[in-house]
Each structure stands twice: as structure tokens, then as C-alpha cells.
Amino acid sequence: MFEGVRDIPLANGTPSGKATGVNGSNPLGGRSTDNLIFSIGAQSGVGNFEIDTTDGVSVINTDYYAVGDATFKLKLEDGGSPTNLSTTLLFSVNFDASNF
């Protein structure tokens, strides 16, 4: 579990905490990140987690009043695979009121 804040911190105006992955098609070449699709699956607790539509890889919380515990599942899908292979990771977040 890690402590979160209402908004993703910015580094020089760019959201941090970006999702990354590889599709395995050519790990040493230039196509290993092509056609990756990130999405938020089940979520519970406080907050409303989404993938930022401006870059497609940043996880954002759109509930500015969230205080307490939350979980969300981040799904990574290889959209270029004929079988659309995917994996999912569960994240736990605590929005601590003292961080505001």
C-alpha cells in the first residue's frame, strides 16, 4: 500500500505514475510497445480511477474529495495480438487527509 494524493503529481507539467508494458513481439526492437491498451477494471472504496485520455497511460483519480482506502485493477491488453493477450494488476491506494 502506498500513500496517494487527490491528483497525480506533476513533473514539469507532465503527469507521473504512467503505466508501461511490452507486448513481447520484439523486446529488442522498436515495436515492443505498439498496440498496448490500458484500462481500469473493477474498483472499490473511495475515488474514481480512470486512464487519462490525453496520453492513454496515466492513471488519474477524478474524485477530488476522496479520503480513505481504495483499490483498482489496471488491465494491460495487447491490441495487436490475434488473441488479444492481457494481464491485470491490483493496486491499493490510501488517500490520507493530511496530504491535502
Image (cartoon, rainbow, N blue to C red):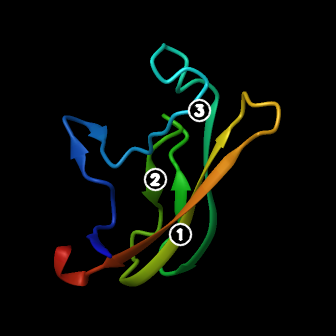
- Residue situated furthest top in the rendering: 30
User: Which residue position holds label 1?
Assistant: 72
Residues at circles 1 and 2 in contact by the CB criterion of under 8 Å: yes
- Measure the C-alpha gap from mark 1 to mark 2: 10 Å
Instruction: Check disc 1 and give the amino acid type.
Output: Phe
User: Which residue position holds label 2?
Assistant: 59
Instruction: Check disc 3 and give the amino acid type.
Output: Asn
- Measure the C-alpha gap from mark 1 to mark 3: 22 Å
Q: Quadrant of the C terminus?
A: bottom left
Q: Which mark is residue 24?
A: none
User: Which residue position holds label 3?
Assistant: 23
Residue 37 appears at what percent x and percent y? 63, 39
Question: For this rendering, which residue is in front, 18 or 62?
Answer: 18
State whether residue 58 is above or below residue 55.
below
**Dot 1 or dot 2, earlier in sequence:** 2
Going 53% across and 69% down the picture, which residue do you hit?
Answer: 72
Near mark 1 (Cα within 10 A), the count class, few <14, some 14-19 or many ≥20, is many
